[in-house]
Amino acid sequence: MKRVVDIIGSSILIILLLPIMLAVALAIYFNMGSPIIFKQERPGLYGRPFFIYKFRTMVDKRDTTGNMLPGKYRLTRLGVLLRKYSLDELPQLFNVFKGDISLVGPRPLLMEYLSLYTKEQFRRHEVKPGITGWAQVNGRNAISWNQKFSLDVWYVDNHSFWLDIKILAFTMKKVFVREGVSANNHYSMEKYKGTP
């Protein structure tokens, strides 16, 4: 049932949002050049890797020694706008259609975090990751990593069709009021370094 909803839901959303995605793609091309899409390997179901797609929000600025500058120096004004309204996430609808992720599930994080999880935290990979999830509608980047993982595991143990509908409804509200987009005025959540 969940997979059927993902296919139908992502198909409808791709069709409805295609004009917006084309407009965003053109804005990125004329402001930042190519590539338009940011592609990165992430852990999926049971930690198996897949490539996630997002609209590009940063440029490749480097210091005098060639090292990449921190994200806050590479994030463009257009990128801030895209993140503010979660427009950078729209290409993930194609990930949903392909079956890499679901509309609802724990957010797919970085591959480097896999070795840092406790046994309980790793349970977040017992379901497919999602574009939005229980942690996203209960704080997103404004809560701690441990709180986020606890909420993810709670979802694993309690997920249902009706809970997914509830999360999708809450997500729409949070996108419009822009709650929890940044963590303590940072441009994104600080990297996870493991549980002490």
Image: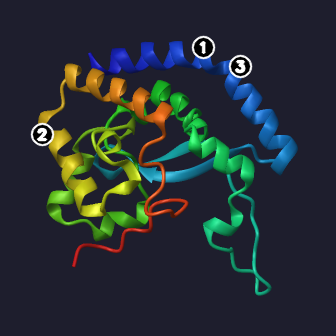
User: What mark, if any, has residue 19 been given in the picture?
Assistant: 3
User: What mark, if any, has residue 16 been given in the picture?
Assistant: 1
Q: Position of residue 166 (x, y in %)?
A: 27, 24
- When asked about the image quadrant of residue 65, the answer is bottom right
- When asked about the image quadrant of residue 105, the answer is top left
**Residue type beneath disc 2:** Asp
**Residue type beneath disc 1:** Leu
Is residue 189 found left or right of 106 in the rendered image? right
**Residue type beneath disc 3:** Pro
Q: Residue at x 33, y 52 (%)?
A: 47
Question: Whole-Å distance between the Cαs marked 2 and 3?
Answer: 38 Å
Tell which tag, 2 or 3, sits nearer the viewer.
3
Q: First in sequence: mark 1 or mark 2?
A: 1
SS for dot 2 = helix
Determine contact: label 1, label 2, CB under 8 Å.
no
User: What mark, if any, has residue 38 been given in the picture?
Assistant: none
Q: Which residue is mark 2?
A: 157
SS for dot 3 = helix
* Residue 105 sits above or below residue 163 on the image: below
Q: Residue at x 19, y 39 (%)?
A: 155
Q: Quadrant of the C terminus?
A: bottom left
